Amino acid sequence: MAPQNKAKLLLLLLQLLLLLTVLPVTAKALTIGVNYGATGDNLPPPAQVAAFLRDSTYITGVKLFDANPNFIRAFANTSISVAVTTPNSAIPSLSTPSGASDWLSQNLLPFLPATNITLLFVGNEVLASLDRSLIARLVPAMRCLSDALSAAGYPHIRVSTPHSLGILSSSEPPSTGRFRRGYDRAIFTPMLDFHRKTKTPFTVNPYPYFGYNGRTLNYALFRPNAGVFDSATNINYTNMFEAQLDAVYSAMKKLGYGDVDIAVGETGWPSQAEAGQIGVSVADAEAYNGNLIRMVNSGLGTPLMPKRTFETYIFALFNENQKPGPIAERNFGLFNADLTPVYDVGLLRDPAVQPTPAPTPTPTPSGSGTGSKKWCVPKADASQTALQNSINYACQHVDCGAIQSGGNCFQPNTLQAHAAYAMNSYYQSTGRHDYDCDFSGSAVVTTTDPSK
Ligand SMILES: *[C@@H]1O[C@H](CO)[C@@H](O)[C@H](O)[C@H]1NC(C)=O
Ligand SMILES: *[C@@H]1O[C@H](CO)[C@@H](O)[C@H](O)[C@H]1NC(C)=O
Ligand SMILES: *[C@@H]1O[C@H](CO)[C@@H](O)[C@H](O)[C@H]1NC(C)=O
């Protein structure tokens, strides 16, 4: 190769390298999950949420607080991973092999493998319930569910249970982290042993929001601060989230399980609270969640767990208007109920396709799409099953009397025609967002009036 060409090649390579290093954070494959709670009376239907997450965000996983079949089904045929949670009250019956396999048969197997269920949480913050009959059966239930999943052919679905940081009797500085006495060897040793053997994560819900004060706000929000020094390890912690994870790690290590993975089941920051509360605003929530996403996607790990990664679920996907308690409880969401972002932490795919606030659904949807210039119709190659599923789904939300026997639009009596009516009614009634015309990939938006 001529020297000039070599120089050119080198320049090209350098340019390429430069290009790679200045790409925005969202150009990388972000991995972040969200808690999809639904304590609200104004939230969109699950299928609309699933299509929105798939098409308009970089969110890769959702965590459900229950095993609601409508929510699990909504994520079918999307690559979005789903974490399902069993009720706490089911734990005693789940701690027998037959109870565990019955529960799976009724609640998960019907949706596998169409829904990408990757985690099964056994209850939520069970130790905080202080209910001895549940706590004593927790690890046996985890073992039984794990065995039942393997027996059913789904050994890759991991079993875990989320803990509040109340499981620690000491956490500051992080090197002093230890589990509460009485639970350490009786509960956590066998639980961590289960996690090690099954290669599943120990799940915790660290909330710097519940631990900050006026002095430690910047430390909690990952903003520049003086740091908190741990003299036992000579580590200067610069944010509370890493300090909390390292406290959990220290507790695990004291029992001999420092190698077990840690997942973050919940963490977050509200964007609104009672007037006068410092540290709560849209900018503060954006700082916490934005910096958290950068931290867990950096691959750098924490001071005591260098290079470890933490599967993380932000709390929460939505502002939930029916949550009881202080104002903050209803304002942890990344999104409003109309799917507009409360703030953007880099999880929106293309600002150009961000939804505008959805108009309130019209009570009498028009099947012919009167007054609109866009219609939702089935794809020509959609399968009979897909058409039927779409009809079933849409008709749970809109009135489909017209395509029932005797109705105005019953003729032509074909699945294709009925699906066209149902899909379009749904699409028109929810405000004509393209993501409402998905129906698991079996529908498409058209500008040609299908009734002509
Ligand atoms: C998912 O896709 C499969 C295969 O195309 C199909 O049989 C199934 O009905 C779909 N499930 C849902 C809920 O859309
Ligand atoms: C299921 O989700 C996991 C985690 O996000 C992902 O790695 C995997 O590719 C997904 N599987 C499918 C079949 O989409
Ligand atoms: C800890 O780090 C912060 C930020 O880099 C620095 O300002 C502070 O002086 C450090 N404190 C100690 C004790 O090293």
Image (cartoon, helix red, strand yellow):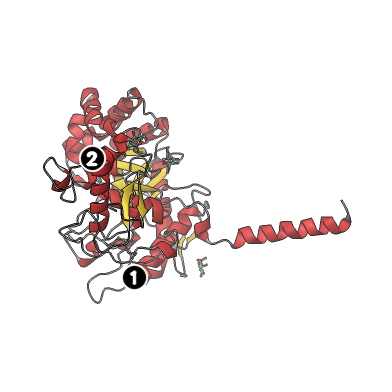
Find numbered disc 2 in the image and state the secondary structure of the residue it sits on: helix
In the image: residue 159, left or right of residue 124 = right
Residue 232: tell me if it is visible. no
Q: Which mark is residue 282?
A: 1
Q: x and y percent of residue 10 in the render?
A: 77, 57
Q: x and y percent of residue 322 in the render?
A: 17, 59
Q: Which mark is residue 330?
A: none
- Residue found 20% across the figure and 60% down from its top: 361
- Residue found 18% across the figure and 32% down from its top: 92
Front residue of 301/13: it is 13
Residue 385: tell me if it is visible. yes
In the image: residue 276, left or right of residue 55 = left
Tell which circle, 1 or 2, labels the residue nearer the N-terminal end: 2
Q: Which residue is mark 2?
A: 69
Asked if 155 appears above or below 431 in the picture, the reply is above
User: Splitting the image into four quadrants, where does ligand 1 fall?
Assistant: top left
Looking at the rendered structure, the kind of residue marked 2 is Pro
Q: Quadrant of residue 123?
A: top left
Find numbered disc 1 in the image and state the secondary structure of the residue it sits on: helix
Q: Say few, some or many: other residues with alpha carbon within 10 Å of mark 1 (under 14 / 14 to 19 / 20 or more).
A: some
